[in-house]
Image (tube, rainbow, N blue to C red):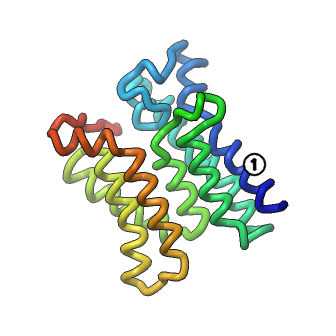
Amino acid sequence: MEHFTIGIISYLMGSIPFGFILTKIFLKKDIRDIGSGNIGATNALRTGNKLIGYTTLVCDISKAVIPVIYVKIYFPEFIFIASLCAFLGHVFPIWLKFKGGKGVATYVGILFSINVMLGGVFIISWIIVFISTKYSSLSSIIGAMSIPVYLLLTRQSNNVIFFIIMFVLIFFTHRENIKRLKNKEENKTKIY
């Protein structure tokens, strides 16, 4: 019963659509009508309001950190259930008819909550790819792939299946970006 409760609470935390809420309150706009239509931080930056974009990023990271850290402290055996459910909440939020974001910021929160080193590996990979390409989507995909690769290279393969699943989910949420990257139609991202 505990795992079910942890899963539901983590999902509900993850499903809070901060990008949608912030653009509604402060810009009186629906973020789903802007840019890619996505509710995440990258699209929130496309509103032209950097403060809303970065606040969305921090909130999307935090909504994973809060439940995952809590579960890590009090119910460590359920950390991967909490992590997956928070991620799925962001991607499939009940409040927006299950049409959410791509889950990258939420995944970053999960990684830092599980192990700071994993968060660092993701961020370093993301930055290297972003500096050389300016594609946030490609940076996110490579960043997600870097985690299972890092774990296998450092022989920490006990939880690698979870991180492979997370990579597959992030790859799935970026399927339209992948098509645009292949067709050289993907937009580059300005983060400053």
Q: Identify whether 131 is placed above or below 167.
A: above
Front in this rendered view, residue 5 or 26: 5
Q: Amino acid at mark 1?
A: Ile
Does 126 sit left or right of 159 as displayed?
A: left
Tell me the residue at 48%/36% (across/down): 40
Badge 1 density bin: few <14, some 14–19, many ≥20, Cα 10 Å: some
Tell me the residue at 38%/52% (across/down): 171
Tell me the residue at 36%/25% (across/down): 35
Would you name the residue on which mark 1 appears? 9
Residue 116 image position (x, y, % from top left) = 54, 68
Residue sticking out furthest to the top? 28
Q: Quadrant of residue 183?
A: top left
Tell me the residue at 59%/28% (across/down): 96
Q: Identify whether 172 is placed above or below 72.
A: above
Front in this rendered view, residue 97 or 47: 97
Residue 140 image position (x, y, % from top left) = 36, 52
Q: Secondary structure at mark 1?
A: helix
Front in this rendered view, residue 45 or 147: 147
